[in-house]
Image (cartoon, rainbow, N blue to C red):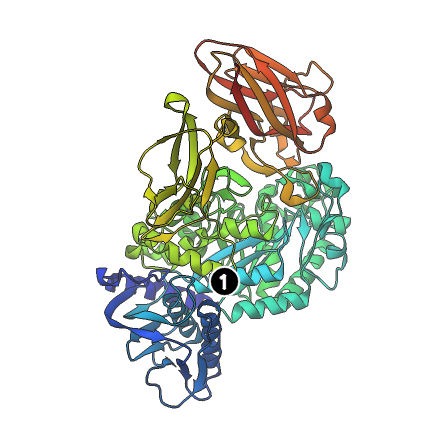
């Protein structure tokens, strides 16, 4: 990508947005992102094994796109159309260069044939992706009728990105390729690859082998310390292969090499690079670390060498240098660095970071590259051609654009896909704030605070998949998709074309396509979730809802799988104990998400998972995974505020007293939270192992103090049981643990509160 095409595409997209609107007649098209203009026509094109894809003789690029289209059709329909050069084109799919420029394309589908027209390869590719989507409305194999339509399309923004963090948790090349396939199918064109952080260095650098020999591996904390080291890295050959794979799908990979902070891993590998001695044991921690590169000439020589190898591998115009969350304590404490500030005539450490970033930027400029960094690089001044990625809300983007700098909007929390997607306890591990698919779709990447001229500096939009709590490839993909598809539409579709209801209508087709592409997308927000309470006559009252409220829920009570003709859920159900309820969500007659099943038992009625309890505070809420047992798939997930591990069972009925059973585990406190660690409330224990305290309200009377005893010797889940006294009326039970220190801390998995007989 270069500056001129970026801005040209933005302007052309805005022009299309003003000129075109998608008419109601195109409502049966399941094309995502929604195109700039789509007009339905009569009839359909029959795609079958006999269909041919035609390209002009000698057009190597068009033939490559045609083969990609044929391969995708084979994956989804089970047959592969032949690709031919020249010859008669009646009844065929034809790729022609007589079309719009850049990433724009025209797709004409009629009963007699299909034409994909674009001047450049990118446009041909996106036209092919649109045709494949229209040919893949579901997972059905065999021939398909593609609705006749004329589509004229171009992107709203030129940078349509997804960042994947491979530094915190390592993903396989196969998973990254599947992610690129899903990005390409939805016209995302920038893969920001976070390769370096405190927890690991993932990129092979030939001149500095210890970066991967040492810096790519860490010892996990807690019980996991007894397991093999965690880590991995990508060889330069693997990177070249992935870069080529992405380029064939019109995706530019932008690498990120963090400076000057988030640098513990390289400093562990080469301690002379640091401002203070490194502590390798902290590589298994999360949070904001104090280790920064020093400002010695030898350190810049190291960074120059690294960046030159990076630029040899990645042809992208932009190279990301981080620049975020650089705590300056070590710089403040270093006489050598304080002398450097004085020598350079700088005001403070913020200006030193600006000088640092600009010096790194000169290495990039020598090879015709452009520096991009997180919005902290604005502090202390910025090189004229530097680009700002705004993550602390949109203020950084606004400031950058007003100052004449190009910018990409990537704001926390809306576009930080490590936040959970619904309040369901079935959500994968991650941050506790709910950022739903609808929330992502509602984000407009063009701030109203900017003038039309200033908006020209908005290159585009990007969502970020930070993987601190995404320990597996499947969890990474589940957190990214389908929210990345919502982002794709907001980055591509003209401003006036955004329509949540229409986007939601297309979701069954989108989920089917993601499955075909090998992506483990999250279905939990679509699925029925139960709420149980005491019903009339000793029955159990069941209420069903979904995280997004889309479509309808249908259920059965006879053990059969729910279908589109099963009973629709309308209101709460009072059902006898032992009833098995099966439920599933449907949208326009198509299943959306998995079938769910519950057998109504007294234990189920009286049990709440930690995510179904109320947190006493929400300072840093996380869904965390236990550190034991060794088999990862057997580890429990627990919802907890790490700065105040405390839970509330609201409106507990203690009229007859109750038997309280709590399943909990002790987890290492491996969080770099600075002074906040000292503010975590600790109640002094009365027994050597501490107690589970139960109070009537968090500041109220203590109803029980249950010694943890032998549970303290168990690295996995333990069950703690006690009788609670009878008490009039309903009460909010507040559950917390006493402890001498915050490490380790206890977290609740589930609570069962059974009325006493």
Which residue in the rendered view is the most extreme toward the front?
Answer: 558
Q: Name the residue located 51 percent from the left edge and 71 percent from the top edge.
A: 248
Question: Residue at the location (24% across, 64% down)?
Answer: 19
Q: Residue at x 38, y 46 (%)?
A: 585
Instruction: Where is residue 173? Give x, y as percent.
Output: 61, 61
Residue 158 in the image: above or below residue 668? below
The answer to whether residue 479 is above or below residue 733 is below
Left or right of residue 280: residue 15: left
Comparing 236 with 57, the one in front is 57
Q: Dividing the picture into quarters, in which one does residue 300 lie?
A: bottom right
Q: x and y percent of residue 457 in the render? A: 40, 57
Q: Is residue 467 left or right of residue 569?
A: right
For the image shown, how many numbered marks are present on the structure? 1
Please tell me whether mark 1 sits on a helix, a strand or a loop: loop
The picture places residue 59, in percent across and down from the top left corner, at 45, 84
Residue sitting nearer the eye, 37 or 381: 37
Residue 535 showing in the rendered view: yes
Q: Is residue 742 above or below residue 319?
A: above
Quick one: label 1, few (<14), some, or many (20+) residues within 10 Å?
Answer: some
Quarter occupied by residue 222 = top right
- Residue labelled with disc 1: 517
Determine if residue 405 is in view: no
Name, please, the residue furthest toward the bottom: 87
Question: Which residue is at the front of the view, 278 or 562?
Answer: 562
Residue 313, position in %: x, y?
63, 67
């Amino acid at each position: 990508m270069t500056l001129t095409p970026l801005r040209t595409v933005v302007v052309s997209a805005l022009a299309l947005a003003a000129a075109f609107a998608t008419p109601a007649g195109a409502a049966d098209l399941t094309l995502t992102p929604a195109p700039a203009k789509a007009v339905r026509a009569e009839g359909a094109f029959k795609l079958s094994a006999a269909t041919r894809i035609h390209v002009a003789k000698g057009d190597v690029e068009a033939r490559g796109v045609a083969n990609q289209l044929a391969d995708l059709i084979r994956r989804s329909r089970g047959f592969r159309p032949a690709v031919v050069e020249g010859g008669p084109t009646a009844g065929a799919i034809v790729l022609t260069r007589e079309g719009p420029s850049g990433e724009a394309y025209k797709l004409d589908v009629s009963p007699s044939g299909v034409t994909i027209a674009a001047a450049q390869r990118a446009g041909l590719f996106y036209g092919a992706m649109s045709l494949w989507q229209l040919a893949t409305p579901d997972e059905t194999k065999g021939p398909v009728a593609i609705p006749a339509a004329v589509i004229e399309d171009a992107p709203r923004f030129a940078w349509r990105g997804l960042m994947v963090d491979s530094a915190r948790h390592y993903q396989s090349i196969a998973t990254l390729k599947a992610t690129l396939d899903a990005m390409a199918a939805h016209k995302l064109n920038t893969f920001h690859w976070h390769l370096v952080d405190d927890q690991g260095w993932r990129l092979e650098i030939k001149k500095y082998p210890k970066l991967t020999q040492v810096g790519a591996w860490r010892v996990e904390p807690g019980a996991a310390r007894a397991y093999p080291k965690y880590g991995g890295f990508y060889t330069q050959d693997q990177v070249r292969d992935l870069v080529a794979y992405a380029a064939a799908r019109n995706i530019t990979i932008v690498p990120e090499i963090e400076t000057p902070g988030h640098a513990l891993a390289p400093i562990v590998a080469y301690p002379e690079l640091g401002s203070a001695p490194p502590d390798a044991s902290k590589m298994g921690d999360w949070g904001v670390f104090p280790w920064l590169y020093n400002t010695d000439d030898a350190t810049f020589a190291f960074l120059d060498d690294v960046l030159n190898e990076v630029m040899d591998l990645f042809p992208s115009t932009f190279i990301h240098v981080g620049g975020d969350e650089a705590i300056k304590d070590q710089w403040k404490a270093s006489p050598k660095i304080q002398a450097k500030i004085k020598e350079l005539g700088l005001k403070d450490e913020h200006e030193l970071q600006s000088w640092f970033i600009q010096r790194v930027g000169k290495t990039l400029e020598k090879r015709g590259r452009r520096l991009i960094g997180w919005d902290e690089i604005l502090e202390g001044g910025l090189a004229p051609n530097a680009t700002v990625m705004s993550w602390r809300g949109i203020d950084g983007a606004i400031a950058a654009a007003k100052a004449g700098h190009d910018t990409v909007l990537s704001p926390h929390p809306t576009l930080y896909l490590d936040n959970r997607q619904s309040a369901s306890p079935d959500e994968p591990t991650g941050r506790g704030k709910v950022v739903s698919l609808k929330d992502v779709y509602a984000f407009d990447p063009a701030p109203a605070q900017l003038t039309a001229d200033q908006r020209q500096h908005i290159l585009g939009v990007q969502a970020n998949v930070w993987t601190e709590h995404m320990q597996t490839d499947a969890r990474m993909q589940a957190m990214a998709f389908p929210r990345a598809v919502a982002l794709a539409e907001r980055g591509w579709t003209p401003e006036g074309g955004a329509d949540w209801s229409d986007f939601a209508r297309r979701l069954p087709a989108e989920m089917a396509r993601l499955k075909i592409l090998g992506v483990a997308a999250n279905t939990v927000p679509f699925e029925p979730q139960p709420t149980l309470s005491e019903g009339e006559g000793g029955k159990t009252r069941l209420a069903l809802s979904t995280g997004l409220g889309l479509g309808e829920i249908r259920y059965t009570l006879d053990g059969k799988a729910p279908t589109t003709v099963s009973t629709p859920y309308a209101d709460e159900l009072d059902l006898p104990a032992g009833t098995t309820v099966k439920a599933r969500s449907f949208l326009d007659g198509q299943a959306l998400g998995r079938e769910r099943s519950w057998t109504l038992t007294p234990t189920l009625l009286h049990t709440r998972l930690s995510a179904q309890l109320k947190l006493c505070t929400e300072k840093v809420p996380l869904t965390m995974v236990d550190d034991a047992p060794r088999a990862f798939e057997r580890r429990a997930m627990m919802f907890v505020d790490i700065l105040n591990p405390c839970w509330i069972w609201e409106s507990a009925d203690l009229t007859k007293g109750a038997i309280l059973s709590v399943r909990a585990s002790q987890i290492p406190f491996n969080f770099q939270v600075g002074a906040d660690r000292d503010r975590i409330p600790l109640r002094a224990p009365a027994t050597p192992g501490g107690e589970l305290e139960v109070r009537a309200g968090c500041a109220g009377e203590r109803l029980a103090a249950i010694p943890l005893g032998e549970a303290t010797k168990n690295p996995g889940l333990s069950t703690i049981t006690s009788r609670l006294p009878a008490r009039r009326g309903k009460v909010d039970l507040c559950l917390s643990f006493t402890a001498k220190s915050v490490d380790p801390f206890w977290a609740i998995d589930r609570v069962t509160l059974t009325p006493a007989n």
